[in-house]
Image (tube, rainbow, N blue to C red):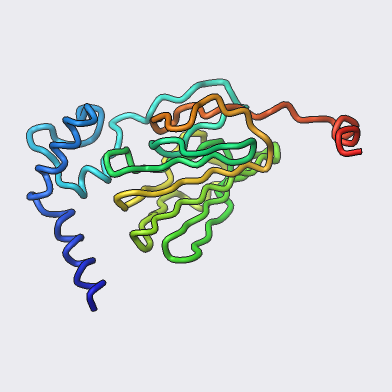
Amino acid sequence: MWSVICKTIKAWWHQSSLSSWYVKRMIRQYAIDLTQFTLTTDKVPTLAQFMLRRYRTKPLAPRNHERLILSPVAGVITKQDAHHITIQMHLHHYHRIHLPIAGTVTHYTRAPYTSTTIHISAPDGLIISLTIATTSEQHATVLRYNPQRNYHLQGTEIGYVYATDALVTLQSNRPCLYSLKKNEDLSCNTALGELSPIHSPSVTHERTA
């Protein structure tokens, strides 16, 4: 019963014009330029409008770099290794999700209600799994893309995260060379790094022998 009441109050707060004062403070604190988003600039948006803001034009992404992996969300890097990179998304960050590579969104899974994993497969065999955990919100990851299309361009928007914060983990089936540092703040579609050169079977065998 109490959880239902809290959820109702939170939903009201997000939609209420009273939340605009909090948004105004975030805009000033993080120097966010609202003119680049599809928001009316004559008044401060509500918290819900702010979280669901969309770019007027798709964020710029590097061109002709098929080996590059782009950031699917905006946030702060918390940890990384050759196969994983984790990004913490906070309330002031852009909340929409974009494809880190070009390919097919094969499927997605939810387990449990606060976690969604999106699977993206590229024609060359590269597979990216994108897990979005929203521990404070259930079903907060909303996916909106055309499942009938068997190929999506890199940087395509596929949904959004309607939660105050989220932990986003990108996992690849091939090792990557990430060029960014821990605690670095990044924008959506920022180049995270590139795929490591694929080792030949003979080199791999020598290393494991």
Q: Residue furthest bottom?
A: 1
Where is the N terminus found, in terms of image quarters?
A: bottom left
Is residue 150 in view?
A: no
User: Front-most of 131 and 189?
Assistant: 131
Question: Compared to 101, does 131 lie above or below?
Answer: below
Task: Give the residue drawn at x 76%, y 30%.
Answer: 198
Task: Give the residue drawn at x 84%, y 30%.
Answer: 200
Tell me if 184 is positioned left or right of 147 in this view: left
Quadrant of res 138? bottom left
Task: Give the residue drawn at x 19%, y 71%.
Answer: 5
Q: Position of residue 88 (x, y in %)?
A: 41, 42
Tell me if 96 is positioned left or right of 46 in this view: right
Tell me if 46 is positioned left or right of 184 in this view: left
User: Front-most of 123 and 190?
Assistant: 190
Where is the C terminus found, in terms of image quarters?
A: top right
Quadrant of res 32? top left
Question: Compared to 143, does 103 lie above or below?
Answer: above
User: Front-most of 66 and 71?
Assistant: 71
Q: Position of residue 3 (x, y in %)?
A: 26, 72
Is residue 113 in view?
A: yes
Q: Position of residue 79 (x, y in %)?
A: 52, 38
